[in-house]
Image (tube, rainbow, N blue to C red):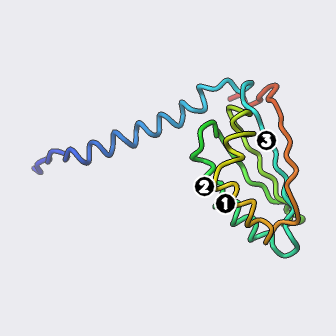
Amino acid sequence: MKEFKMMSPKWILLMVTVIIISCNSVEKESELNVSEATVVLVKYKAQPEKGSEAVSELTRLIEKVELEPNFLNLKLHVDPADETNILLYEVWSDVDYYNSAHMNTAHLKEFIENSRNFLAGPPEISFWNVENEFKPSK
């Protein structure tokens, strides 16, 4: 018969931390009433032959944006017929934060400066309030 060894305190702490982080990310989305969220659509046009570079640079930017307060979700879309058409579907809990603090972050300012190398011009940004959310019924 094999003996069970006690788990080390470090291992237990690691497991508890992972569980807490998982629960917090679920709570973040469930705490916010969907009607309170603001959807931000950001349409980019990359320079010819620079669609992949634009997606790569946007991905690097998004990795930093995800850490900001009031950020809830973001989806990056690429037009299958034209890779230079890129759409970000962003969900934020506070539109005022988005328009002020987010727009003044160092990572966004750096992206804007570097984007002259791969984007055809500034993006088109529009704001949308969620009226209703529909999910498949199971």
Q: Please give the name of the residue rendered at 32% of the width and 46% of the height, measured from the top-left corner.
A: 14
Residue 110, quarter of the rendered image: bottom right
Q: Amino acid at mark 1?
A: Thr
Residue 49, quarter of the rendered image: bottom right
Q: Amino acid at mark 2?
A: Glu
Q: How many neighbours does mark 3 have within 10 angstroms: few (below 14), some (14-19), or many (20 or more)? A: some
Q: Considering the numbered disc 3 on the image, is that residue within a helix, a strand or a loop?
A: strand
Position of residue 41 in the picture relative to residue 5 (left or right): right
Position of the C terminus by quadrant: top right
Residues at marks 2 and 1 touching, judged by CB atoms closer than 8 Å: yes
Q: Please give the name of the residue rendered at 64% of the width and 40% of the height, measured from the top-left corner.
A: 71
Residue 23's disc is none
| Residue corresponding to mark 3 | 40
Compared to 122, does 96 lie above or below? above
Q: Measured from the top left, where is residue 40 in percent x and y?
A: 79, 41
| Residue corresponding to mark 2 | 63
Q: Measured from the top left, where is residue 119 in percent x and y?
A: 83, 66
Q: Considering the numbered disc 1 on the image, is that residue within a helix, a strand or a loop?
A: helix
Q: Please give the name of the residue rendered at 26% of the width and 42% of the height, measured from the top-left corner.
A: 12
Q: How many neighbours does mark 2 have within 10 angstroms: few (below 14), some (14-19), or many (20 or more)? A: few
Q: Please give the name of the residue rendered at 88% of the width and 62% of the height, measured from the top-left corner.
A: 121
Q: Measured from the top left, where is residue 24 in percent x and y?
A: 49, 34
